[in-house]
Image (cartoon, helix red, strand yellow):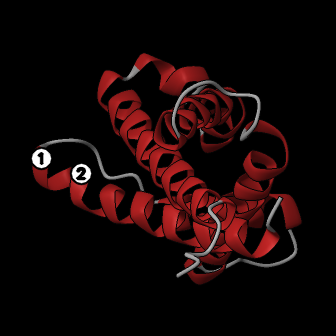
């Protein structure tokens, strides 16, 4: 595992997913405010003081990096297909985990309470996260494995 590459891929993938989530309302999908949701959960967990939305965004990026490390350390060599396909498969796994763990914490329930628009928006976001993660991390691995041109 290349931790620097995984960190960079995690930041890029998280930024890509977040950008998509900010655009989704313009195509009729519900607004998914990750930063606000994470900060609300942290406020409830800490129960000492409110945690601002900025901390929610910090947590979002940190989770993206954490998932990238898990992907690079465990899943990258265990999933089939190209770098992009492996990333998309990992994105599906993260989506399912988010629907089983994170969605109930936000009050929407397991699998977003069956809200199809929320499920579509979340799935699209996680597919973008996984696809970008797999592609960015995988392309770096492929170029590192190729020998330098000997001329």
Task: Measuring from the top left, give residue 142's x and y in whole percent.
Answer: 59, 56
Q: Which of the 4 quarters of the picture holds residue 146?
A: bottom right
As rendered, which of 37 and 99 lies closer to the eye? 99
One can see residue 101 in this view: yes
Residue found at x 72% / y 52% = 67
Residue 66, position in %: x, y? 77, 59
Quadrant of the image occupied by residue 58: bottom right
Badge 1 density bin: few <14, some 14–19, many ≥20, Cα 10 Å: few
**Dividing the image into 4 quarters, which one contains the N terminus?**
bottom right
Q: Mark 2 = which residue?
A: 24
Question: Residue at position x 12%, y 47% from top?
Answer: 27
How far apart are the two marked residues, 2 and 1, measured between alpha carbons? Answer: 5 Å
Mark 2 touches mark 1? (CB < 8 Å):
yes
Secondary element at tag 1: helix
What residue is pinned by disc 1? 27
Q: How many marks?
A: 2
């Amino acid at each position: 595992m290349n931790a620097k590459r995984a960190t960079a891929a995690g930041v890029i993938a998280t930024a890509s997913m977040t950008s998509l989530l900010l655009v989704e309302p313009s195509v009729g999908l519900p607004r998914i405010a990750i930063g606000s949701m994470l900060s609300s959960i942290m406020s409830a967990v800490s129960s000492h003081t409110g945690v601002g939305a900025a901390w929610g965004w910090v947590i979002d990026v940190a989770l993206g990096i954490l998932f990238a490390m898990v992907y690079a350390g465990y899943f990258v060599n265990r999933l089939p297909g190209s770098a992009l396909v492996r990333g998309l498969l990992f994105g599906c796994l993260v989506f399912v985990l988010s629907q089983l763990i994170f969605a109930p914490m936000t009050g929407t329930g397991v699998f977003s309470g069956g809200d199809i628009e929320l499920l579509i928006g979340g799935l699209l976001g996680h597919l973008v996260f996984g696809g970008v993660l797999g592609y960015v991390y995988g392309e770096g691995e492929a170029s590192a494995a190729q020998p330098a041109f000997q001329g």
